[in-house]
């Protein structure tokens, strides 16, 4: 069978002729396959709430000391490594569907052993089994989904694998935690909860994931001669300014860096939108999602100048993001929640981040098609303005404060 053979290039559950029933089948099949990554996430997140409980356990229940607790958290990764090797062999011998079914056996067996454990060794054995299942599921599920999906939805369904992993982690946090919805009535809970979720949402609505994902394409659109080298430059800038942020974080404070970062991103996204407006603003110019080369009526010298405007705007955005809105939402998330709800609250924040990252990255192309590229970047600029205003009016400064003082601040004391 040659690569050009239609049977080789067609997805298994693609909707030939726009068949709606078969289109629904691919979503159902992908959801079933993604239950493996959901269990994977649950197994990863399980150690966080379970370890403190097992360290407090009294005989005859198994008790974990510090050394055993570290093994309980880490041994799952050893199982996952073995599962990755096993999954690679199994997926070719048993097929994708049967491999997905088989990986449920060590999941069930592993948690059954943990539940019935009489000593530390049974706990570790159960974790090893769940890790083995994680390794198989993390390999087989993406392969299966990519093979059954037709091109129009392959990105959407493929991204759901990571989404289900973080949903599983959140479910694990919710299953050992003493979180009750009534707690949300307390200012010390709902205020940091709103701040944490909003920070994660604004971080992704700035468009950073979409910009990084399309970096080379954007540089090609900007007529940069070596787009791959330009992407390396962007990576270096990101690392450098993240390091700068770490060095000055405890001197400058969180709020100042967030505001400064947001203002820089406002100007850079506005400038980048202006570049596309100048080069693609004509009624006959393309705004296709593939970012095909802009048809510019500017003279050659002017086009070169505009290309450097795009390059400079991109680098400025990455530098601004790395100084504030990159690291600080994660830092504040770890500081603002009281200890008794920190697991659930941070889990919801992480889930929000991944959901927004998925939506922005997946829909960025469609947004550029509807609003044209300059409109998409100006929309990102508007979100950056809202993030600055939110910081000024809602985010407290946590620099130099103890966790107790931060909680007291939200309680109004």
Image (tube, rainbow, N blue to C red):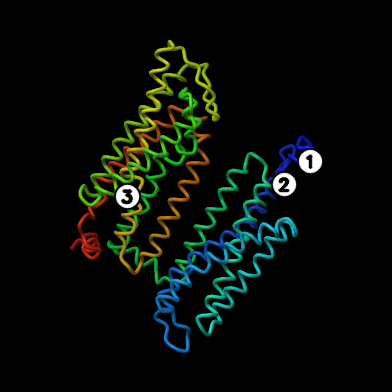
- Gap between marks 1 and 2, in whole Å? 12 Å
Q: Where is residue 121 in the image (x, y as percent from the top left)?
A: 53, 80
Q: Which residue has dot 2 on it?
A: 13
- Residue sitting at 39 percent across and 60 percent down? 346
Q: Position of residue 328 (x, y in %)?
A: 32, 50
- Residue sitting at 62 percent across and 63 percent down? 83
Which quarter of the image is occupied by the C terminus?
bottom left
State the residue in front, 190 or 83.
83
- Residue sitting at 36 percent across and 27 percent down? 271
Position of 368 compared to 406: left or right?
right
- Gap between marks 3 and 1, in whole Å? 50 Å
Q: Which residue has dot 1 on it?
A: 7
- Residue sitting at 22 percent across and 63 percent down? 402
Q: Earlier in the sequence, mark 1 or mark 2?
A: 1
Please say if 339 is above or below 381.
below
Number of numbered callouts drawn: 3
Please say if 153 is above or below 89.
above
Q: Please rate how many residues cluster around mark 2, counting C-alpha atoms within 10 Å: few if below 14, some from 14 to 19, many from 20.
A: some
Q: Please rate how many residues cluster around mark 1, counting C-alpha atoms within 10 Å: few if below 14, some from 14 to 19, many from 20.
A: few
Q: Where is residue 114 in the image (x, y as percent from the top left)?
A: 54, 77
- Gap between marks 3 and 2, in whole Å? 43 Å
Q: Which residue has dot 3 on it?
A: 328
Q: Residue furthest bottom?
A: 60
**Within the image, what quadrant is residue 1 found in?**
top right
Tag 1 and tag 2, C-beta contact below 8 Å: no
């Amino acid at each position: 069978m040659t690569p050009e053979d239609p049977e080789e290039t067609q997805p298994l559950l693609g909707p030939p002729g726009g068949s709606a029933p078969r289109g629904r089948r691919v979503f159902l099949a992908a959801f079933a396959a993604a239950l493996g990554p959901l269990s994977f996430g649950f197994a990863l997140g399980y150690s966080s709430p379970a370890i403190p409980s097992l360290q407090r356990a009294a005989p005859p229940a198994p008790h974990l000391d510090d050394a055993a607790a570290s093994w309980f958290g880490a041994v799952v990764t050893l199982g996952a490594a073995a599962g990755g090797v096993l999954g690679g062999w199994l997926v070719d011998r048993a097929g994708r569907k049967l491999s997905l079914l088989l990986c449920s056996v060590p999941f069930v067996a592993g948690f059954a052993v943990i539940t019935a454990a009489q000593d530390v060794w049974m706990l570790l054995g159960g974790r090893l089994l769940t890790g083995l299942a994680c390794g198989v599921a993390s390999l087989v599920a993406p392969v299966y989904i990519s093979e059954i999906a037709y091109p129009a939805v392959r990105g959407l369904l493929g991204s759901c694998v990571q989404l289900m992993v973080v949903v599983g982690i959140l479910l694990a946090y919710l299953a050992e935690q003493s979180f009750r919805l009534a707690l949300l009535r307390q200012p010390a809970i709902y205020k940091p909860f709103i701040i944490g979720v909003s920070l994660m949402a604004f971080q992704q609505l700035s468009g950073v994931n979409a910009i990084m994902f399309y970096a080379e394409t954007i540089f090609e659109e900007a007529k940069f001669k070596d787009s791959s080298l330009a992407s390396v430059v962007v990576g270096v800038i990101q690392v450098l300014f993240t390091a700068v942020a770490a060095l000055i974080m405890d001197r400058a404070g969180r709020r100042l860096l967030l505001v400064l970062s947001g203002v820089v991103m406002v100007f850079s996204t506005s400038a980048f939108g202006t570049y596309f407006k100048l080069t693609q603003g004509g009624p006959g110019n393309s705004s296709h999602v593939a970012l095909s080369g802009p048809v510019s009526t500017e003279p050659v010298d002017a086009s070169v100048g505009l290309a450097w405007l795009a390059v400079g705007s991109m680098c400025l955005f990455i530098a601004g993001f790395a100084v504030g809105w990159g690291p600080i939402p994660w830092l504040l998330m770890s500081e603002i929640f009281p200890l008794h709800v920190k697991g659930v609250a941070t889990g919801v924040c992480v889930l929000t981040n991944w959901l927004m990252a998925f939506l922005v990255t997946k829909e960025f192309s469609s947004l550029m098609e509807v609003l044209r590229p300059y409109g998409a970047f100006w929309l990102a600029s508007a979100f950056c303005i809202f993030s600055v205003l939110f910081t000024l009016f809602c985010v407290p400064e946590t620099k130099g404060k103890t966790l107790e003082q931060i909680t007291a601040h939200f309680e109004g004391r």
